[in-house]
Amino acid sequence: MWRKVCTCEFGTAKLMKSRHGIAVVAVAVLWISAVDLCAREGNKDWVVLENCRLITNPANDGDSFHASAGAQEYIFRLYLVDAPETDALAPGRLVEQAKYFGVTVPQVIEVGQAAKEFTRQKLSEPFTVFTHMADAMGQSKLERFYAFVQTKDGDLGEQLVRNGLARNYGFKGVPPRLENSRLEIQKLQQFEDEARREKIGGWGVSAGRLNERAPSPIAFSVFVSEQRQPRTTRRAHSTVPASVMPTPSTPIAANNPAGSSKSHEKAKTPLGRVDINTATEKELTTVPGIGHVMAARIIAARPFRSADDLKRVSGIGDKKYAQIRPYFQ
């Protein structure tokens, strides 16, 4: 009996020790996983890197490139957009991209090379990067981070898409001061649709229009690190809480506050004066009952045979149609 009891107690103690060890290992694994998750998700606040400069590297392409901020080197990958590959190292992606643009694989590589050159030119002057330091992964030993990149002309991703050198496709990110990425995605889709209609960039490569560019000026989104203050030299690596980020100078999601002067513009819109196929987003939002979201949907649904086709736009029912139809010619 004594031996059995002792063996039992010994076994129990051993089991408890074993369970304790397993618990310690489990905690360690969870801790490592949490650290890894934090590294991939990045900082909650925007890290604003000003006066960045492009670093020439064979791996650079239209939407991913090496850059320096002070003495630090980074690789950045643009949010929300995807430029074609520049070589045949990823055949699966090339086939998928070629199918998207409706071209051959050799042609889509041409588009990728044109996008790379476009980005090189746009980043030939100092630029600003907005990033959460979220891991974009990649094959380089240097970590790659998702980012919005601001050139002197505005958001780089929007410029690529508007010129037919990238598609509205990629890892989603919420631009500074916006609550979600939906409206920025809608704006990118509008740009993509316009580039397709104009047959420029990848949409016109078969017609010899690869190097044709969109007419200017175009209202690309602009993000700034200090609201309504002159641009000053900042440290290369600084963290600016998202809560104090200013509204982009080109609003893409803002609704006019109640009582603002712009809210009265809609009442002045003449009946039958808005062209359904050529009106800008700003012009569409002057029509009572049409906000930025609905304007983006209307633009994305173009071309229309006539304003009577408004009913096929998502969100426009009989009541909404009756309200807005008189304003379109």
Image (cartoon, rainbow, N blue to C red):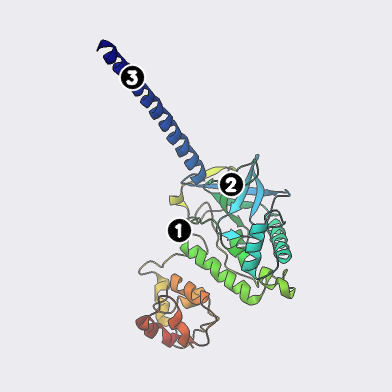
Q: Earlier in the sequence, mark 3 or mark 1?
A: 3
Write the residue at 62% across / 76% down: 197
Mark 3 belongs to which amino acid?
Answer: Gly
Q: Nearer the viewer, residue 91 or 237?
A: 91
Above or below, comparing residue 17 to residue 134 in the picture: above
Q: How many marks?
A: 3
Mark 3, mark 1: which one is toward the viewer? 3
Disc 2 target residue: 137
Residue 70 visible here: no
- Kindly indicate whether the residue at mark 1 contacts the one at mark 3 (C-beta within 8 angstroms): no
Disc 3 target residue: 11
* Percent position of residue 55, x then y: 70, 47
Element under label 2? loop
Residue 198 visible here: yes
Write the residue at 59% across / 56% down: 150
Above or below, comparing residue 135 to residue 271 in the picture: above
Mark 1 belongs to which amino acid?
Answer: Leu
